[in-house]
Image: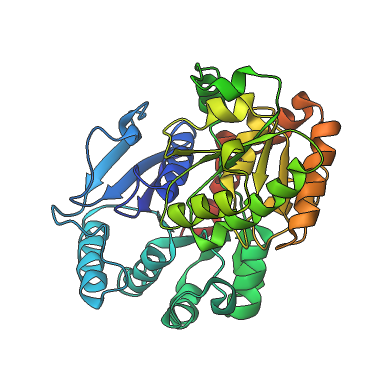
């Protein structure tokens, strides 16, 4: 059987979260029966982790020396990247193009009109409902006009798929749910690194929050829930992340008089060592696309409590089977769920077993079936 050639598109690949998804899937596919190209732009750095463990039949292809990493939805950026993508597709014998993130998906669908011999698979990471996410109103129109041109559209969670089919005109027969992969081995190996933090050496339970300090993640709710928790038991809260709401959250912690029990670590390159030693990971989001931090915590054997927000957490936790789910915005419910989990934690091995469902090789098997279907 001849090897098929697959290209993963998006100049951010190898650097951002979506890039990590495609890097993991692409490398796993390369170990099967595919040749894989990762398409990048001038912003790509050769010291990227994408280069680590790159199979012989994988290439990193620079479409252009220009930097398109911050073009947003600028028409000039769209036209420029469409031109360079088309130039690559015309010169290379590609069977299937796999695109990731909305703006790159729109470009890929546009290119497929010209180079229609290439199968196109779009991967949507995000919920696109404007009322929920407050994204620009132009995005739904771009999605509705371009996504139906693709051979297949992949959603990273059942809620993302439902949103695409019900609100953005994607045919249910062309839309499948395939979760983001997790490099379980990498998470486990990094989780055993030493933690230089006194709180993780004491008997007082530590609750961990990880993510960007933005409105979507609703860390203010977590602080309010933690304050309620401390009324009934001793605990500490460690927040790993950064973002525009950092100062507001610090002020809220002081206002709630829990600032001595809350530590803001800032951005950390290895959150897994903290996950491994925390008694609990808490997620307070209004919505998620997938919620990879949930699978990462499970891989560390760490219990998870999450809001039952639109997106992936309920999929990963199987509607509460592997972790408590509470209503979005319910600080009392989140506090109760944290207290319950601290008092009666689940078996860590059971959580790790659940995380293995998201191994890159298993996810790549599902991508392979889609690639075969999309090949023209």
Examine the image and state in which quarter residue 327 appears: bottom right
Residue 264, position in %: x, y?
A: 49, 40
151 relative to 109 in the view: left or right:
right
Front-most of residues 80 and 209: 209
Residue lying at 23% horizontally and 57% vertically, measured from the top left: 88
Q: Quadrant of the C terminus?
A: bottom left
Residue 162, position in %: x, y?
A: 67, 69
330 relative to 142 in the view: left or right:
right
Residue 340, position in %: x, y?
A: 85, 40
Front-most of residues 340 and 6: 340
Residue lying at 35% horizontally and 54% vertically, measured from the top left: 9
Residue lying at 64% horizontally and 29% vertically, measured from the top left: 278
Q: In this rendering, does residue 115 appear at all?
A: yes
Please, is residue 238 above or below residue 255 in the view? Answer: above
242 relative to 249 in the view: left or right:
left
Front-most of residues 248 and 326: 248
Please, is residue 66 above or below residue 35 in the view? Answer: below
């Amino acid at each position: 059987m001849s090897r098929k050639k697959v290209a993963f598109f998006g100049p951010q690949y190898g650097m951002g979260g979506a890039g990590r998804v495609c890097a993991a899937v692409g490398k796993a596919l390369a170990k099967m029966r595919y040749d894989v190209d990762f398409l990048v732009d001038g912003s790509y750095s050769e010291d990227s982790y994408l280069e680590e463990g790159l199979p012989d039949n994988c290439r990193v292809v620079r479409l252009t020396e220009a930097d398109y990493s911050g073009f947003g939805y600028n028409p000039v950026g769209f036209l420029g990247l469409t031109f360079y993508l088309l130039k690559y597709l015309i010169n290379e014998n590609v069977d299937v193009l796999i695109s990731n993130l909305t703006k790159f998906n729109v470009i890929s669908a546009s290119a497929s009109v010209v180079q229609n011999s290439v199968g196109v698979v779009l991967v949507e990471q995000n919920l696109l409902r404007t009322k929920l996410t407050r994204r620009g109103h132009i995005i739904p129109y771009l999605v509705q006009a371009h996504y139906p041109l693709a051979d297949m559209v992949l959603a990273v969670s059942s809620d993302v798929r439902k949103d695409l089919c019900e609100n953005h005109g994607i045919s249910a027969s062309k839309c499948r749910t395939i979760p983001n992969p997790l490099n379980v081995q990498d998470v486990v190996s990094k989780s055993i690194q030493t933690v230089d933090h006194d709180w993780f050496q004491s008997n007082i339970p530590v609750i961990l929050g990880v993510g960007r300090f933005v409105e979507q993640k609703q860390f203010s709710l977590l602080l309010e829930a933690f304050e309620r928790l401390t009324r009934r038991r001793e605990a500490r809260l460690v927040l790993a992340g950064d973002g525009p709401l950092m100062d507001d959250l610090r002020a809220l912690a002081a206002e709630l008089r829990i600032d001595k029990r809350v530590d803001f670590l800032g951005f950390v390159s290895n959150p897994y060592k903290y996950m491994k030693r925390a008694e609990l990971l808490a997620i307070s989001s209004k919505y998620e696309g997938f919620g990879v931090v949930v699978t990462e915590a499970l891989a560390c054997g760490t219990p998870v409590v999450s809001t039952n927000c639109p997106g992936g957490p309920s999929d990963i936790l199987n509607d509460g089977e592997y972790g408590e789910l509470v209503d979005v915005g319910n600080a009392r419910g989140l506090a109760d769920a944290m207290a319950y989990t601290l008092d009666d934690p689940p078996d860590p091995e059971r959580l790790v077993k659940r995380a293995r469902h998201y191994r890159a090789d298993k996810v790549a098997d599902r991508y392979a079936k889609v690639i075969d279907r999309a090949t023209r």
